Image: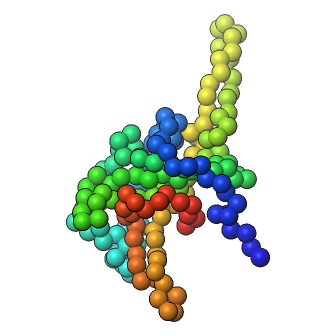
C-alpha cells in the first residue's frame, strides 16, 4: 500500500504570515504570477469553469496582489526534503456573491524551519560576520486547482482555482 505524502506531513495550524514567510513568498512571486496566467490559459482551453470567477479580470488584474497585503494565511510542515509551505493569497480584484477570492499555493523551502547561517570574513579586519541565509532555496511548487464532486463515473463536476475565505488551507500536491 502506497503512503501518501499528505498522510505523513503534519502541518502547523493556519496562521498569519511571519516576516520570513513574506520574504520567501516574495522570492517566488514572479513564478506564482506566471503560473496563475499559464494555468488560466491552459484551463480555459478545455474547462473554463476552473477560472470562471476571474473571467472579467485581465491577467494584470488577476496577478495584481502584493504579498505584504494579500498573503493572509500560511501553514507549514517538515518533509524529508525540507519544509513544504502553503499560502492563501487574496486576489484583490475578486469580490462577488461568494465574497473575496483567494488562491492557494505551495512551495518547498530548504531553509525555512532551520535557518542556515554562513560566515563572511572581512579581509581587511579578519573579523567574521554571520549572515542569515534561507530564501535562496525557496521553490514555487504549485497552485491548487480543485476538481471536485465526482459524478457516478468518477469525473469531476465542479472546478475551482479561486477559493473562498472559508476554504481551508490544506495539504495539496499538484
- Please provide percent x and percent y for residue 166: 40, 60
Q: How is the image coloured?
A: rainbow
Q: Residue furthest right?
A: 1
Question: Please, is residue 95 above or below residue 29 in the view?
Answer: below
The image shows a total of numbered marks equal to 0
Give 117 or 90, whichever is nearer the viewer. 90
Question: Please, is residue 60 above or below residue 163 in the view?
Answer: above
Going 64% across and 40% down the picture, which residue do you hit?
A: 113
Q: Is residue 80 left or right of residue 41?
A: right
- Please provide percent x and percent y for residue 85: 56, 50
Q: Residue furthest bottom?
A: 153
Going 25% across and 58% down the picture, which residue do you hit?
A: 95
- Please provide percent x and percent y for residue 152: 50, 92
Going 33% across and 49% down the picture, which residue do you hit?
A: 65
- Please provide percent x and percent y for residue 3: 73, 69
Q: Is residue 82 left or right of residue 167?
A: right
Going 37% across and 68% down the picture, which residue do you hit?
A: 40
Give 124 or 18, whichever is nearer the viewer. 18
Q: Is residue 91 visible?
A: yes
Specify the quadrant of the image occupied by residue 39.
Answer: bottom left
Q: Residue furthest top?
A: 125
Q: Is residue 112 left or right of residue 163?
A: right
Question: Please, is residue 6 above or below residue 1 in the view?
Answer: above
Q: Is residue 36 visible?
A: no
Q: Quadrant of the C terminus?
A: bottom right
Amino acid at each position: 500500500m502506497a503512503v501518501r505524502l499528505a498522510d505523513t506531513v503534519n502541518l502547523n495550524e493556519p496562521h498569519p504570515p511571519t516576516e520570513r514567510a513574506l520574504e520567501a513568498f516574495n522570492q517566488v512571486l514572479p513564478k506564482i504570477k506566471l503560473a496563475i496566467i499559464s494555468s488560466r490559459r491552459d484551463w480555459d482551453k478545455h474547462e473554463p469553469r476552473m477560472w470562471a470567477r476571474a473571467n472579467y479580470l485581465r491577467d494584470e488584474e488577476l496577478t495584481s496582489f502584493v504579498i505584504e497585503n494579500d498573503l493572509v494565511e500560511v501553514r507549514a510542515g517538515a518533509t524529508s526534503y525540507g519544509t513544504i509551505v502553503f499560502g492563501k493569497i487574496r486576489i484583490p480584484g475578486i469580490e462577488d456573491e461568494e465574497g473575496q477570492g483567494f488562491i492557494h499555493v505551495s512551495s518547498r523551502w530548504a531553509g525555512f524551519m532551520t535557518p542556515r547561517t554562513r560566515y563572511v570574513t572581512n579581509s581587511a579586519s579578519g573579523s567574521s560576520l554571520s549572515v542569515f541565509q534561507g530564501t535562496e532555496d525557496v521553490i514555487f511548487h504549485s497552485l491548487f486547482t480543485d476538481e471536485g464532486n465526482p459524478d457516478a463515473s468518477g469525473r469531476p463536476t465542479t472546478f475551482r482555482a479561486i477559493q473562498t475565505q472559508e476554504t481551508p488551507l490544506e495539504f495539496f500536491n499538484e
